[in-house]
Image: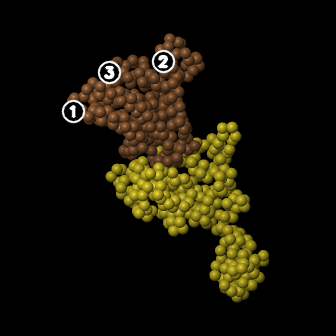
Amino acid sequence: MRIPLGYARYQLRDSLTQRLSLPLIVIAMFAVLPVYVMAKHAAGAHGPDEAVFAKQLYLQSVTLFLPMGAFLCSVGVASTDRQHGYFRFLFSKPVNVLAYYVQAYVVAGAAFVVMFGLITWGFGAMTIHFSVHRAMEAALLTYVLLGGIGFLLGALTRFDGVAFIAIYLLALLLQQFMAAPNGLHNGGLPDWLAAIAKVLPPVVTLDVLRNHIYAAQALDPSQLWLVIGYGAGAALLGLALLRRGPLAR
Amino acid sequence: MCKTYRSLLGRQVRAVDDVTLDVAPGEVVGIAGPNGAGKSTIISLLLGFLRPTAGAVSIDGLEPRAYAERSGVAYVPELMALPTHWTGEGALRRLAVLAGVPGGRVEREVDRVVDALAIGEHRKKRLKTLSKGNFQRIGIAQAMLVDAKVVVFDEPTHGLDPVWTQKFREIVLSLKRNDRAIIIASHNLDELERLADRVAIIDRGRVQRVVTVNAASVTQVMAYRIRVVAGGEAVLARFPGATAGANGDIDIPAVDIATLNANLAAAIGGGALISGVIPRESALEQAFHSAVGAGGQ
């Protein structure tokens, strides 16, 4: 089986220029305000208000950037080539199709995690310190779950972007409902909706884990394995579909 | 092999129906057929991009995807689909890497195919700015990056100007090798007649006929157009049913080669001056029209 390792640099370039450029713009917009506030004060003389402000903005941008970045890095990995017919050029060459897509998925994920680490480091250097390794752990966990979902949907349908957004929002809505501390069984959701919420990607559990990572708290192993298992299972199912299904539609 | 598509409503369309075709190393085989005949589906099955509903495809004893992943296939698709923000040389570089060209040789190989297809002035342009013909030349160039034993062209001269159509023929002839099988799917019967050893005529998903090209025989019966400079009446007298055109050409009905030569000799003996004898339809065109019908092309 020939693995196109030499092609990884092109896949990395595509990830950075086509997939991560939009989230970078978003995060830069979030970064401008706290950096400006901090810059008004002398170095090392940040007051507690500025530090809280910077931390809040950072966490808000994380909430937005991480799912968006994982979405943009994984959606299209397995669908664009087939949708546009590029596969005819790529896979007439002596290349293993599965190895090509596994590599594309891993490279996009690595770019996403490292980029987020760099952003955190840069943001921290200009405002207050944030743990870079915790930021990268959170990004990795997000990519494992949401990236796996994106990859699976790309193997299933050409409408993977729309499907991803619909599934993510539905999961978020239903699972937040279920987790509402209102004392009702399943948060008041009917059983059939609760059953749907349980089979959808555990995005609320992911949020909980991410908050624990940032707070340097211990992670619940069952929650951790649920998120990792769900994402990895989705990615493996995507690979199985790519192996079984035709490249041409 | 067969390939059946099923719509969401359950309706079945048989795109390829019981097709059997062998291609030997050293051979150039054409696939001809009208639009929608199943040519491109056969090519997709051959490359493993589609799987047959029934039957099997094998290349050198392997399932097509396994063969392509092991050895690669030089393939020029009908649809030139590459990301259009790539430059010409960027596309060739990427595809050279995928083709397994070692890192140190990529630039040299790209230069070689750029020179062969004379696309030097376009190599730094984005693909979206290229004309259809130049884009097609990039497509042919990328196929030449692989030293493949299976070469597949799907409508290869589509979009090429006459000069490059002629050059493409030279390229195909230069690719001909004893250990290499070349398959060309095309509408262009003239092109297939010049390049192919055999042509499979496909219609409604079936192989209607396989024609061995350029195998003229004394029993071959064809209609001709005779270009006459003087003495047309001598020609008309020798060929019953012949008709004179406005420009002095004479169309004669189908005759075998022996009769044609004998009657022409007699006409020349009777004072006719002849500048040319042209088949009104080539053997391939005749076979195509009888296999596909008048509405075929």
**Residue for badge 2:** A179
Query: In the rendered structure, which disc, 3 or 1, sits on the residue that comes first in sequence?
Result: 1
Query: In the rendered structure, which disc, 3 or 2, sits on the residue that comes first in sequence?
Result: 2
Along the line of sight, which residue is nearer the eye, B109 or A228?
A228
* Chain A painted colour: brown
The chain under label 3 reads A
Secondary-structure class at tag 1 = loop
The residue most toward the front is A40
Along the line of sight, which residue is nearer the eye, A6 or B175?
A6
Pointers 3 and 2 in contact (C-beta within 8 Å)? no
**Residue for badge 1:** A43
The chain under label 2 reads A
**Residue in the image at 42% along x and 35% along y:** A69
**Residue in the image at 25% along x and 26% along y:** A47
What amino acid type should be assigned to the residue bearing mark 2? Ala
The residue most toward the top is A183
Distance from disc 3 to disc 1, alpha carbons, whole Å, reads: 27 Å
Pointers 3 and 1 in contact (C-beta within 8 Å)? no
- Which chain is in yellow here? B
The residue most toward the right is B240
